[in-house]
Amino acid sequence: MTQSARTQVVVVGAGMVAQKFVEALRAKDVDGRCAITVLGEESLAPYDRVHLTSFFSGTTPQELLLGDPALWDDDLVTLRTSTRVTRLERPEQVVVTDVGERIAYDHLVLATGSSAAVPPVEGRESTGCFVYRTLDDVEALRTYVADRALAHSERQVRGAVIGGGLLGLEAGGALQAMGADTAVVGFADRLMPVQVDAGGGEDLKRIIEGTGVHVRTSTATARINADDDGRVVSMDYASGENDPVDVVVFATGIRPRDELGREAGLEIGPRGGVVVDAHCLTSDPAIHAIGEVACIQGEVWGLVAPGYTMAEIAAAHLLGEAPDFTGADSSTKLKLMGVDVASFGDAFATTPGAREVVYSDALSGWYRKLVVAEDGHTLLVGDATAFPSLRAMIGQDVGAPSAFVIPEDERGEKAQVNLELPDDACVCSCNNVSAGQIRAAFADGATSVDAVKECTKAGTSCGSCLPLVIKLVEVEQAKADITIDRSLCEHIRMSRSQLFTAIRVADLHTFDDVIERFGTGRGCDVCKPTVANILASLENGHVLSGQQASMQDTNDHVLANMQKDGTYSVVPRIPGGEVTPAGLIAIGRIAETYGLYTKITGAQRIDMFGARIDQLPAIWKDLLDAGFECGQAHGKSLRAVKSCVGSTWCRFGVRDSVRLAIVLETRYKGLRSPHKLKMGVSGCARECAEAWQGRRHHRHRERLEPLRRRQRRVQAGARAATRRGSHRGRTHHRHRPVLHVLHLDGRAAAAHRTLAAGARRRHRAPA
């Protein structure tokens, strides 16, 4: 079929719903009857707006891109970014761009989404007022906060978010992550008033305030005040109160971007949005509208799942099918500033005959509420672990309701959870995948979680359904007698967590005792380091004493890193990378004395190469005399905490990152871990310490697998070559993943309490 003979489909808008429509149409159009042109205002391909806040914690715009990039390489798909459509000419079936270009269509799909709703507050146009909607918005916000931090280096930047809903709390978390002293100001009497009842709202407010964010509810903003340069300086409230602020973010809802349809004469809903029928068709039979721009069943849906449903329906209708929009999943599950929140169904028990089961624990921060009616509508706020299963059970018999709200350790025998999802239960609302489809995929050979995700796309969008997908696959594996081997290795038929508990309960102290009690054979380079780590974690003496010494790596024994030529490198500990001129001179003198090659490592440390093993004791002594420890950089331990210069020197720094790095490295320098452990501390959102350089979004993991396979082959060859060397009989270094940690504020102590339990043993070089 020639290009001119194909149906020319033009999509105005390049957001998440537009991307879903293109995916759906290409998947259904096996004969290639349609040629698709997508016109988007932004400079990027469709990206994940749901996870926009992750931009402030290191996620790049490229990592936010949706789906398979190959979609835009399809010969029948054309994506044009930075292209704004200004007018529809319906009689001629043409769209006109901002540069006057005329693009003809046989069928048009409006997927223009929505814009941020800004209330008519006096001063809203002042410099320092932002909305929170696109990547451009959040980039501008980040730049402005950094600029204000420079201008007010003597104090924190003061930020306020107007709006106490989902988006307001996300924006508040983003401001806090940038180092701003943040307040969330809501007009309603509680946070998240659409999703949360009064009890849940009160608990949520208490938890959010516990993170350091100030919360004002039942508060109307009257005016935003600016200085002589037009910059925001304060906010006035209707109550007469006033707060000083440097930056204001409006997060008060959305408005459908229906101006194209409105000006073209399409029917518009009473509260905005292009009116569509059950097939997502507008009053013009040549135009569909989908997503947040559409008014369907008298309502504009501001969630991604209903938009995805509309995209599927519009694609099917274009190809002659006739599915109807019968409603969509309006559930919400997200993590706000460390707080799990989940909501779905009849949150306020408005259904006649509804009954509520509530569990509230203000001390632990849990609020759980289950509303049970004839249709099983439910709500959870607080501990949201049961969310995926319960959402899928709407309309089903849930048995004993109390089982879902009472903590597991407090349940009686009569209140146990036992869910068997029917085949028509929706598991993944983003991609409209049912439990039956997952079971069918398993029966067709997709017998692992990754295979099911690849086949059905369940769990590949927002990710909230992934626990349920895993559970369904595990149930099917059990039914098919497929045993998942979680053994540590061929010698120990336990998982690491099981082995840790077994060693602790049995009070074992040597590898021989462990292998005799719980294993077979003589061990390997998998179980030996694991057992060594467990024994070290259980207060079992010095890591080089007794039989423990035989389980340590070569580098642990010599407190240096063996190189390929048989020499060793030595890295003196420099906490936080902070070193005095005298210390640098001492390191230089030692390197010169022993003829060592020196290099700055990726962790901001000085590495000295070429030492013979007989030189090591003298090098250690000289370093210790100069005030340096050594040996830590080569074992399974905390190796280094690198940092930027932070607020000490940097004009953008909002936190003392150097001091925190020194505290962390000093506090945990004796920690024995299963693998090497590195950290990084950045003093602002510019992230100069690259603390998140090892982080990759879950959607990009599969792209890294070929590199990982290649890396494993190289490492296997290196290990084989090492075993053929002169150090036979010892366990040599294996590849270890590196953990990178980012801390932007003073709450780091809480994040490290877990590490503290295992940091009691100190592993230092002998004097």
Image (spheres, rainbow, N blue to C red):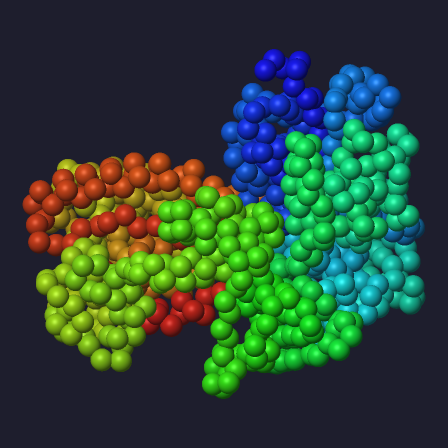
Of 758 and 529, nearer the camera is: 529
Question: Dividing the picture into quarters, in which one does residue 364 lie?
Answer: bottom right
Identified at 62% across, 39% down, the residue is: 20
Tell me residue 649's x, y (percent): 56, 47
Identified at 72% across, 51% down, the residue is: 326
Left or right, 739 with reference to 63: left
94 is higher (above) or lower (below) than 369:
above
19 is higher (above) or lower (below) than 224:
above
Assign the N terminus to one quadrant of the image: top right
Left or right, 200 with reference to 387: right
Assign the C terminus to one quadrant of the image: bottom left
Question: Dividing the picture into quarters, in which one does residue 545 lie?
Answer: bottom left
Residue 26 appears in the figure: yes
Left or right, 611 with reference to 109: left
Of 592 and 397, nearer the camera is: 397
Residue 134 appears in the figure: no
Tell me residue 84's x, y (percent): 76, 27
Identified at 16% across, 54% down, the residue is: 731
Tell me residue 700's x, y (percent): 47, 41
Question: Dividing the picture into quarters, in which one does residue 212 lie?
Answer: bottom right
Identified at 19% across, 40% down, the residue is: 718
